[in-house]
């Protein structure tokens, strides 16, 4: 007595075995684009959520000591948002006079008040493109599709490669765009009326 399945008269397949035919494939062709669409939208949703809600705020400073380098004369930084670009530790950087103290910056006492300073690497933490100071709010809105809330309508550091925005008054925090990590900060000292760079935070691994 043969206990196995009855042979298929059309071949050696056991009876009941499912045969994949061109017709069955054509009847279910829609599964492929639907699955692809669902996967694509799922990835886009995850990516949008990641770059919007997983931006990392600057933590405590972690400067790596580098040989001191003169950057500018303090007297040359006469007004808020005065800027001096420089290269330090092989990285393009920027020194800013800012209107108030910022995390990781330096506040210099002067006669009649104080001068807050901040300096950052200009390499975007997304894919290392250079960032530049965007002073015009309309340029920021038109070119970067970003209009800060009223309390933050001041110059920002913007990357023109993928339109990330970093806020100098928040310690270089990424506030818009694909970047999720803050800009590395530069340690500053004032020596005899000159501003020196004396350390810099490590460059983060670029985010995707």
Image (cartoon, rainbow, N blue to C red):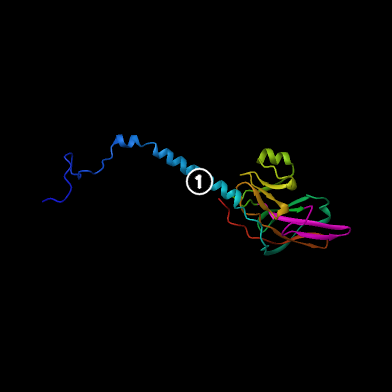
Which residue does the image show at 48% across and 42% down from the upper left? 40
Q: Is residue 7 left or right of residue 27?
A: left
- Quarter residue 14 falls in: top left
Toward the bottom, the furthest residue is 65
Q: Is residue 133 above or below residue 58?
A: above
Q: Is 115 inside the magenta-drawn segment?
A: yes
Q: Using the rendered image of the protein, determine whether residue 24 is visible from the camera's viewpoint.
A: yes
Residue 172 at what x, y percent from top left? 69, 53
Q: Secondary structure at mark 1?
A: helix
> For the magenta stretch, what is the residue range?
98-122
Q: How many marks?
A: 1
Residue 57 at what x, y percent from top left? 65, 56
Which residue does the image show at 75% across and 47% down from the upper left? 151
Toward the right, the furthest residue is 112
Q: Is residue 176 left or right of residue 118?
A: left
Q: Nearer the viewer, residue 201 or 174?
A: 174
- The residue where tag 1 is placed is 43
Q: Nearer the viewer, residue 179 or 3?
A: 3
């Amino acid at each position: 007595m043969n206990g196995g399945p009855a042979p298929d008269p059309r071949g050696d397949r056991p009876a009941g075995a499912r045969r994949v035919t061109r017709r069955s494939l054509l009847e279910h062709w829609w599964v492929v684009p639907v699955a692809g669409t669902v996967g694509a939208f799922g990835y886009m949703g995850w990516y949008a959520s990641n770059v919007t809600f997983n931006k990392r705020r600057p933590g405590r400073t972690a400067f790596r000591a580098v040989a001191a380098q003169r950057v500018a004369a303090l007297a040359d930084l006469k007004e808020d948002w005065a800027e001096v670009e420089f290269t330090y530790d092989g990285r393009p950087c920027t020194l800013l006079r800012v209107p108030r103290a910022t995390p990781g910056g330096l506040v210099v006492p002067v006669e009649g008040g104080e001068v807050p300073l901040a300096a950052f690497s200009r390499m975007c933490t997304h894919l290392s493109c250079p960032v530049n100071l965007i002073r015009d709010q309309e340029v920021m809105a038109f070119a970067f599709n970003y209009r800060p809330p009223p309390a933050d309508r001041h110059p920002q550091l913007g990357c023109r490669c993928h339109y990330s925005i970093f806020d100098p008054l928040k310690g270089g925090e990424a506030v818009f765009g694909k970047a999720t990590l803050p800009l590395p900060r530069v340690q500053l000292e004032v020596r005899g009326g000159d501003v020196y760079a004396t350390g810099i935070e490590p460059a983060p691994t670029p985010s995707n």
